[in-house]
Amino acid sequence: MPRLLLIRHGESEWNAVGRWQGQADPPLSERGLLQAEAAARVLGTFESVTASPLRRAADTAVVIAAELGIGPVPTDPDLMERDAGPWQGLTRDEIEVGWPGHLDAGTRPEGYESDVDLMGRVGEALGRIVARTDSESLVVTHGGVIYALEKACGEPLSLIANLGGRWIEWSDGGLALGPRVELIPDGTVPDLL
């Protein structure tokens, strides 16, 4: 039965300053590159690595794949983060000024990609990965993708650190959630780096 480990990319320059990224494409921070290197050292063996084409995920995947000695790393646009519409590039404080109470109420603005649309495209991407996988594959994607998958399976929202992730198993055309993992505890970089 194919298993996939979905992980969130390393810290991006916008993560470092608290900006909502959505499908904007800021690069990894220096810390994010170090996180990817550290995560690669604790991962086991994978048949393949696939990534979102957004730089923060694709670059994380390339670093990990090089350390694991596998590649090339294909990208799939259906693994991209949720489109956050007009919230892309804004901080939580800026969102609160423009849309008072929306964050706390769970309300999202027009142009914000729905869970149904997000899961539709992500499900297609995961199906393509499983179709070419015999054992375990690594998927480098985004927090919003993992949150939506967990929500679709009835899990409560729980924040996920950079280089945190979730195992999923695929059987008879459906998926089941496995355990969460934290490759870099709390997204920190070990002192030895």
Image: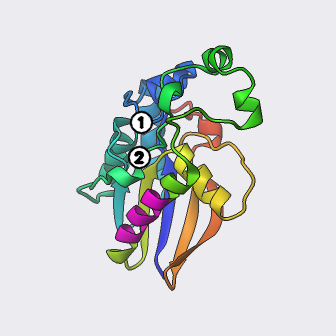
Magenta segment, which residues? Answer: 120-129
Give x and y (percent) for residue 151: 67, 56
- 160 vs 76: above or below: above
Residue marked by disc 1: 23
Rendered residue at 58%/22% (across/down): 18
Q: Quadrant of residue 60?
A: top left
Q: How many marks?
A: 2
Asked whether residue 81 is in view, the answer is yes
Disc 2 target residue: 80
Q: Is residue 166 above or below residue 176?
A: above
* Amino acid at pointer 2: Met
Q: Residue at x 56, y 68 (%)?
A: 168
Kindly tell me whether residue 164 is visible in this rendering. no
156 or 110, which is in the foreground? 110
Identify the main secondary structure in magenta. Answer: helix
Residue 67's place in the image compared with 86, above or below, is: below
Q: Residue furthest left?
A: 72
Q: Are marks 1 and 2 in contact (CB under 8 Å)?
A: yes
Q: Amino acid at mark 1?
A: Gln
| Magenta span contains residue 67 | no
Residue at point 54%, 18% (across, down): 17
Q: CA distance from mark 1 to mark 2?
A: 7 Å
